[in-house]
Image (cartoon, grey):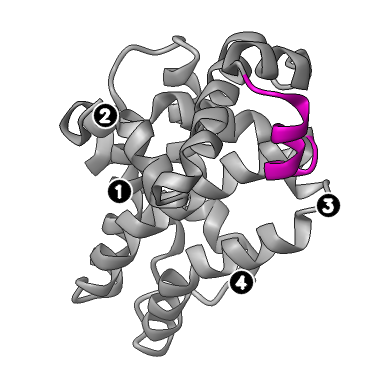
Amino acid sequence: MSTENLSETQHLFERAEPGVRKAHKRHILSIALDCFDEQGLEATTIEMIRERAASSIGSIYHHFGSKEGLVAALYFAALDDQLALIRPRMQGAARPRQAVDALVQTYLEWVERQPKLARFMLRARHAVAGGPQSETLAERNKERYGELLQWIQDGIRAGEIRRLPSETYASLLIGQSENYCRAWLSGRVKGSPTTYAEVFSEASWRAIAA
């Protein structure tokens, strides 16, 4: 299959696990994502993934260590892909308000581009946060929101942003968008997330603006 014909998700796995020698690992990730999306996180077993991927149990455990490790690998690949899109837009922002717009709009775009992974992330968050990779997740989230937190500090100093407990900003800024995306991914609402990008950006800004 040529690079031009690869799906968005396959491109993501190519970026997360590059190189010919990691082709089988990427294949397992892709199959696992399909299984988790179709069967759910709890119901999917390593044996289901092995059979569908035409792999071996040994190969899966060699690459990921456990089902929890496979779930975490998928989750971190998705986080890294979001960061790769968000970071340059945040760095190109001129003011805190533009940084907030960049965060919200990029997140909504990513969900539309990667609906299967977005659905997986919403289902898997608590499992990863409460599993053996919890410290790694904390570090990834710190990196994910690092640019934003710098803009928030600059905005506080400039009198544009309210001083709030630091752990609340992420929920205030992305929580409403995330709730809508959850409804869209489950089919409860029909309007695509980016249709309402301005609405959610405005709501996020009002939540923290001085």
- Residue at image mark 1: 106
Mark 4 in CB contact with mark 1 (< 8 angstroms): no
Question: Residues in magenta?
Answer: 55-66
Image-based side of 106 in relation to 127, left or right: left
Q: Amino acid at mark 4?
A: Ser
- Residue 161 on the magenta span: no
- Residue at image mark 2: 6
Report crowding for label 2: few under 14, some 14 to 19, many 20 or more residues within 10 A (C-alpha). few
Q: Amino acid at mark 2?
A: Leu
Image-based side of 171 in relation to 134, left or right: left
Identify the residue at image location x=73%, y=42%.
62
Percent x, y of residue 26: 49, 36
Dominant SS in magenta: helix
Kindly identify which numbered label has been placed on residue 166. 4
Q: CA distance from mark 1 to mark 3?
A: 29 Å
- Residue 63 on the magenta span: yes
- Res 125 seen here: no
